[in-house]
Amino acid sequence: MPLSLRLYRMLMRAAGPFAGIILARRRRQGKEHPARIRERYGETAIERPDGPLIWLHGASVGELGSIFPLVDKLRQSGVHILVTSGTVTSAALAKERLAGQAIHQFIPLDVPRFVSRFLSHWKPDLALFIESDLWPNLVFGCRERRIPMIILNGRLSERSFTRWKVLPHAAEALLRPFDLCLAQSRLDGERYLALGARRVEISGNLKLDVPAPPLNEEKFNELKIAIGSRTVIAAASTHAGEEAAMLDVHRRLHRSFPGLLTVIVPRHVQRGRGIYDLVEKFGLSPALRSQRQFPTQTTDVYVADTMGELGLVYRLSPIVFMGGSLIEHGGQNPIEAVKLGAAVLHGPHVWNFAEIYTALDAARGAIEIEDQEQLVSQIGGWLRDGNLREATAQAGLKTVNRLSGALSRTLAQLEPYLLQLRINLRPGDA
């Protein structure tokens, strides 16, 4: 094992006694679930079900959202499913979308004894790591127990690849234990191979195969009635700095479009109150969804600071700016907006979803804007020409449909492992 990873393991062993302090601070910040802190120590009150168990791990909401169809297919194989993640928001999503299909647990802190406790209790027969959230002690713990490991929907951004190249021996030691790496794109696959992965296959992006989020008819009708016939534009998953840009867009366009309503959905919902105050500083009238407020005819900006309602916003807004892209964050996932018929704009910083945005832009299924001025110009153009906007939305939908198929390719690669689990399945275990 490389020196860097030996040092990491020593540090994490030493960090064990301080876990309580770290978790207490995170709990005060709203980053931990108060009633489920013990899961971070690898403890649980839930019994392991009898029979084969597949464990899937994803860091947060984005990774978890990509595996819902996969979990459904795996359950049809007669195995039990354990899903882990690391954020409060992902736990809420798992409760909503995976209830009855899978057990959800918070991933333990990467302290050796916490990891050992977790693995000794759950004894997974197959471990599937989603995208790139690889914790060394978890990986080595699985290796020591001879648990087959696969990376699903593997992605390595240019930044991550560059960082790992600084520690090539550590990267290789971390990737070598994996039986298989299913990469999103050829470029991702080449990067995994360069860092030391033993076997890489290109499966595509599972997020392209996820159905559009389900519609809550009651909430949709309530909001639709409140909005009435007003023109709606939306900014989704925004980060600090991008809200101000959208407020400037609204202020400059509402003279030409008097009924304009701008909906802002912050990436982190706890920022809702701060955005509300910012709207007022711009001299505009806000409403805050987390306070059960609805937009009135005098509302300029509706701050939708709630979890799990982007699908609602996309269905109501024909124009969506995808956040995290005007600032150097790497962009947010545009697929749901495209699938629900929105014309999508984004800034230049989209390396988190480079392949998708490249394909969309090439097909004129999304439009890249460089700055705030272009944002005003493009949204204004679409508001004036509905046919042009609709052409972009249709091109985007065709592109997403063309790129789909990752679910079937992933299942084909997993079939030998599932066959082995079925062979080991005892009568009554299913």
Image (cartoon, rainbow, N blue to C red):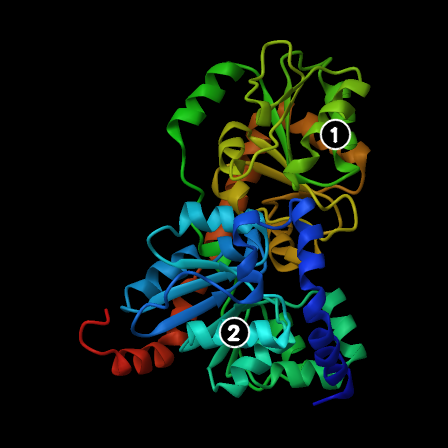
User: At 51% from the left edge and 44% from the top edge, which residue is drawn?
Assistant: 336
Give the percent coordinates (x, y) of residue 166.
Answer: 81, 78
Where does the C terminus fall, quadrant-wise?
A: bottom left
User: Do the residues under discs 2 and 1 have CB atoms within 8 angstroms?
Assistant: no
Measure the alpha-carbon separation of dots 2 and 1.
41 Å
Mark 2 sits on what residue? Answer: 117
**Residue under numbered circle 1:** 274
| Quadrant of the rendering where the N terminus is positioned | bottom right
Task: Indicate left or right for 233 with 255 as reference.
Answer: left
The residue closer to the viewer here, 125 or 183, is 125
- Depth check: give the residue in front, 412 or 39: 39
Residue 376 vs residue 50, the one in the foreground: 50
Q: Looking at the picture, does residue 74 appear above or below residue 236?
A: below
* Amino acid type, callout 2: Arg
Query: Which amino acid lies under the numbered mark 1 shown in the image of this protein?
Result: Gly
Q: Which dot, 2 or 1, sits closer to the camera?
A: 2
